[in-house]
Image (tube, grey):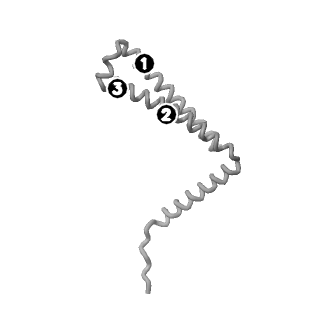
Amino acid sequence: MLKPKKQIISDESAQKFLDTIARIKKQRKENKRKGSNNHMVNKYFQATKAHFLSKKLEAEAVLDTYFNNSVGIGEHSELLVEVNQWVEKLASAEDALGVLDRYEQRKYHT
């Protein structure tokens, strides 16, 4: 007589997994139905998001250097002006990323 094997995952976890697979299949089917131009739009969207993420990371790196590394400060006699400019660049990039996130939510959740 064969003994039943131990259950590796719970029934609830298995159902969540199956629900996720079904949701992904449904999304893929909807994307195919919308047409092949959707792929290009996504690439432009991804490139735009990457651009502003890069700007954000650059500003954070520069500000981190100014605030935490005295070597980066020695070259700038107008340090406060320079810091303010990088703070504005950081805020601008974060704002742009927020706009893109809101756009993406509106576009794909309506």
Q: In x, y percent, where is residue 34?
A: 70, 47
Q: Which badge, 1 or 2, is on the more N-terminal residue?
A: 2
Give the residue drawn at x 59%, y 54%. Answer: 24
Q: Please, what is the three-letter code of the amino acid marked with disc 2? A: Leu
Q: Is residue 30 left or right of residue 90?
A: right
Q: Which residue is mark 2?
A: 53
Q: Which badge, 3 or 2, is on the more N-terminal residue?
A: 2
Q: In x, y percent, where is residue 56?
A: 46, 30
SS at badge 3: helix
Q: Quadrant of the C terminus?
A: top right
Q: Quadrant of the N terminus?
A: bottom left
- 21 up-or-down from 62: above or below: below
Q: Which residue is mark 3?
A: 65
- Front residue (pair 109, 26): 26
SS at badge 1: helix
SS at badge 2: helix
Q: In x, y percent, where is residue 57?
A: 44, 31
- Whether tag 1 and tag 2 are in contact, CB under 8 A, the answer is no
Q: In x, y percent, where is residue 41?
A: 64, 39
Q: Please, what is the three-letter code of the amino acid marked with disc 1? A: Asn
Quarter of the figure with residue 106: top right
How far apart are the alpha carbons under marks 3 and 2?
18 Å
Quarter of the figure with residue 101: top right
Quarter of the figure with residue 40: top right
Q: Is residue 105 left or right of residue 83?
A: right
- 43 up-or-down from 57: above or below: below
- 55 up-or-down from 32: above or below: above
Q: Please, what is the three-letter code of the amino acid marked with disc 3? A: Thr
Give the residue drawn at x 53%, y 63%. Answer: 15
Q: Residue furthest left?
A: 70
Which of the two discs, 1 and 2, sits closer to the camera?
A: 2
Q: Which residue is mark 1?
A: 84
